[in-house]
């Protein structure tokens, strides 16, 4: 859902010239700005690496729920895969900005009781050490889906009617997917004063 929403904002944004999508299966999104690579093994990028250079930013939206996974399984997906992609991209694009969608509650200390929060915190900390021009960690809470997109989770759709109320009551924890996409784009274009952006920071950067 997040990836589709971010791509949607990239398509609409006048300062985004071209978009390279890397997916395990075809996205079905067709647009003149888009080139798509379908690649099954994200742990081995050797065959597609020559096509990954020349980009200003990576908006990394891949992620899974930790429900039902051991810490080792979740680490392999959320940490190992992400750091492999980040390492390859930083080597090929040292002037790139890397944007990582983490989540509200991520544990930067890596010592907390919540498994997913520790792993996400470890991932954020490692990404910020890679030799990118900049790396920004985005920690949205509830995300209001973009109308008309196909990959909206059912529970998000069911809660959509509550969005105006939640936005007023919990402004620090509630965002639209549009705001997240715009903030990620703007972090590449303009930068951000903070490397770690909570929902309030994301909303502010989206207005830039």
Image: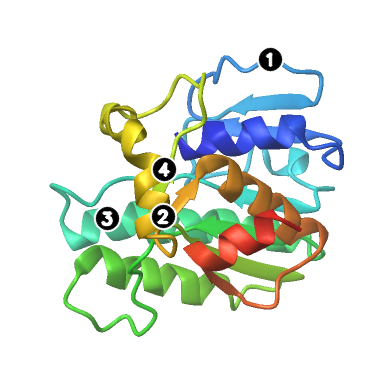
**Gap in angstroms between the C-alphas marked 1 and 2:** 36 Å
**Gap in angstroms between the C-alphas marked 2 and 3:** 34 Å
Where does the image place residue 99, in percent across and percent down from the top left? 61, 58
Where does the image place residue 112, in percent across and percent down from the top left? 22, 80
Q: Which residue is mark 4?
A: 164
**Gap in angstroms between the C-alphas marked 4 and 3:** 33 Å
**Gap in angstroms between the C-alphas marked 1 and 3:** 32 Å
Q: Which residue is mark 1?
A: 30
Q: Is residue 90 above or below residue 9?
A: below
Instruction: Name the residue: 70% across, 63% down.
Output: 90
* Disc with the residue nearer the chain's start (4 vs 3): 3
* Circle 3: element type: helix
Q: Is residue 116 above or below residue 158?
A: below
Q: Nearer the viewer, residue 42 or 173?
A: 173
Q: Which residue is mark 3?
A: 74
Instruction: Name the residue: 75% across, 31% down.
Output: 12
> Is 163 on the left or on the right of 61, as rendered?
left
* Disc with the residue nearer the chain's start (1 vs 3): 1
Circle nearer the viewer, 1 or 2? 2
Tell me whether circle 4 and circle 2 mark residues in contact (CB < 8 Å). yes
Circle nearer the viewer, 4 or 3? 4
Q: Which residue is mark 2?
A: 168
**Gap in angstroms between the C-alphas marked 4 and 2:** 6 Å
Tell me whether circle 4 and circle 1 mark residues in contact (CB < 8 Å). no
> Is 110 on the left or on the right of 56, as rendered?
left
Instruction: Please say whether residue 92 is visible from this viewpoint.
Output: no
Circle nearer the viewer, 4 or 1? 4
């Amino acid at each position: 859902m997040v990836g589709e929403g971010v791509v949607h904002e990239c398509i609409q944004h006048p300062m985004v010239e071209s978009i390279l999508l890397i997916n395990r299966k075809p996205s079905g999104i067709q647009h003149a700005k888009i080139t798509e690579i379908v690649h099954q093994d994200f742990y081995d990028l050797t065959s597609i690496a020559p096509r990954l250079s020349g980009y200003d930013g990576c908006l990394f939206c891949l992620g899974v729920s930790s429900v039902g996974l051991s810490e080792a399984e979740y680490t392999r997906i959320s940490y190992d895969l992400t750091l492999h992609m980040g390492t390859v991209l930083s080597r090929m694009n040292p002037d790139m900005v890397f944007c990582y969608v983490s989540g509200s509650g991520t544990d930067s200390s890596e010592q907390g009781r919540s498994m997913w929060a520790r792993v996400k915190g470890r991932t954020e900390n490692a990404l910020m050490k890679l030799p990118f021009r900049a790396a920004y960690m985005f920690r949205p809470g509830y995300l209001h889906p973009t109308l008309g997109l196909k990959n909206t989770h059912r529970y998000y759709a069911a809660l959509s009617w509550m969005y105006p109320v939640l936005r007023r009551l919990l402004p620090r924890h509630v965002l639209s997917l549009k705001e997240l996409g715009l903030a990620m784009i703007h972090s590449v274009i303009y930068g951000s004063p903070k490397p770690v952006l909570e929902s309030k920071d994301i909303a502010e950067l989206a207005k830039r």
